[in-house]
């Protein structure tokens, strides 16, 4: 296990390799902006994958996250042991872990029970290790990349399981945040709406991933704002991603979705949602920046876009 000094040395070394990134000045500027921005693990894996870097090298990844002026890291947690390792290294470098992303399979009763037990074990470990308060889950589809939709019975089973999971997390002082990809928007968005319209709002909150709404509805900004209006009171976390012409951008900036308008729609919430940068890249994305460069620029733009929240 790496020491705090070793990890910080890695961050400084990484800064020295970039012409415009300096650890002390970047972190100071980020803190001065008054709008804390976190990042999700997934986009870093996409950047690392295209550059040939090892996405399993957690210490290097967290060093770069710190370098960008981001205050927190949302891992894709796979086990209690995994989250303990993340927590140890995050604490050593001064990163928080207020949220975790955990996979689940909830549309069949037997599998749902096993999945709930697994998520609860990971969530309990995360709370103990780093005070994690938000548990994000995207219930798995019938097949990743598949075209088949769940039956009404499977949707009802899944919604009931989410209620059960959310209630158990609430008892542990945590909040469940439902997340979707594009498949849930098919067939009139029946899956997304049933997961939110038929569950207890005290037990199940919403992680609004604007770009998956956008893409799932045929690249529709209208759909993003409609979902935001419908479920604003449930939103406790935002995943931030942008595109140009439907293709994921390298950094979070102006593009297909007007995030300033989204910020205005959600500005009146009693508690501002956790802002999590998830600016991943895909095959047609431009290739002009490193992960650290893209996330630093994205963090700056996110802080500017949501600056109205700084005094709320």
Image (cartoon, rainbow, N blue to C red):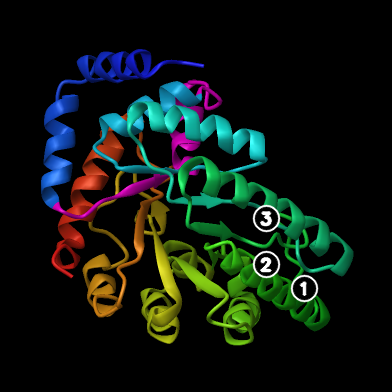
User: Is 44 covered by the magenta stretch?
Assistant: yes
Residue ID at (78%, 69%):
107
**Label 1 belongs to which residue?**
150
Q: How many marks?
A: 3
Q: Label 1, label 3: how many angstroms apart (C-alpha)?
A: 24 Å
Residue 105: x and y in percent read 75, 59
Residues rendered magenta in the picture = 34-57
**Label 2 neighbour load within 10 Å: few <14, some 14-19, many 20+:** many
User: Does residue 36 sit above or below 19 in this rendering?
Assistant: below
Residue extending furthest toward the right: 110
- Element class at badge 3: helix
Q: Label 1, label 2: how many angstroms apart (C-alpha)?
A: 20 Å
- Element class at badge 1: loop
Which is more N-terminal, label 2 or label 1?
1
**Label 3 neighbour load within 10 Å: few <14, some 14-19, many 20+:** some
Q: Nearer the viewer, mark 1 or mark 3?
A: 3
Q: Is residue 182 left or right of residue 150?
A: left
Q: Nearer the viewer, mark 1 or mark 2?
A: 2
Residue 264: x and y in percent read 22, 76
Is residue 284 shown to the viewer in this render? no
Which is more N-terminal, label 2 or label 3?
3
**Label 1 neighbour load within 10 Å: few <14, some 14-19, many 20+:** some
**Label 3 belongs to which residue?**
120
Do residues under tags 1 and 2 come within 8 Å of each other at their CB atoms? no
Residue ID at (25%, 80%):
268
**Label 2 belongs to which residue?**
165
Q: Is residue 36 left or right of residue 4?
A: left
Residue ID at (41%, 16%):
3
Do residues under tags 3 and 2 come within 8 Å of each other at their CB atoms? yes
Position of the C terminus by quadrant? bottom left
Q: Label 3, label 2: how many angstroms apart (C-alpha)?
A: 8 Å
């Amino acid at each position: 296990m790496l020491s705090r000094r070793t990890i910080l040395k890695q961050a400084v070394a990484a800064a020295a390799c970039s012409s415009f990134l300096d650890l002390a000045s970047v972190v100071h500027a980020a803190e001065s902006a008054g709008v804390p921005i976190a990042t999700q693990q997934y986009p870093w894996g996409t950047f690392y994958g295209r550059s040939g870097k090892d996405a399993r090298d957690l210490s290097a990844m967290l060093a770069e996250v710190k370098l960008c002026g981001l205050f927190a890291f949302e891992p894709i947690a796979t086990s209690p042991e995994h989250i303990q390792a993340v927590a140890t290294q995050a604490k050593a470098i001064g990163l928080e872990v207020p949220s975790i992303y955990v996979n689940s399979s909830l549309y069949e009763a037997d599998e749902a029970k096993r999945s709930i037990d697994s998520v609860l074990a990971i969530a309990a470990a995360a709370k103990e290790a780093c005070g994690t308060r938000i548990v994000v889950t995207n219930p798995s589809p019938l097949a990743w990349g598949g075209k088949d939709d769940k039956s009404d019975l499977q949707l009802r089973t899944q919604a009931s399981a989410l209620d059960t999971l959310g209630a158990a997390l609430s008892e542990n002082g945590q909040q469940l945040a439902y997340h979707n990809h594009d498949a849930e928007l098919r067939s009139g968005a029946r899956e997304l709406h049933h997961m939110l319209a038929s569950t207890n709002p005290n037990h199940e909150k919403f992680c609004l991933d604007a770009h998956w709404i956008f893409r799932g509805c045929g690249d529709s900004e209208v759909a993003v704002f409609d979902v935001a209006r419908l479920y604003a009171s449930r939103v406790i976390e935002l995943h931030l991603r942008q595109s140009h012409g439907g293709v994921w951008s390298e950094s979070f900036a102006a593009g297909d979705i007007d995030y300033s308008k989204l910020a205005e729609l959600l500005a009146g919430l009693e508690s501002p949602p956790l802002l999590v940068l998830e600016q991943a890249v895909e095959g047609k994305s431009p290739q002009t920046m490193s992960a650290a460069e893209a996330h630093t620029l994205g963090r700056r733009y996110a802080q500017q876009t949501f600056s109205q929240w700084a005094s709320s």
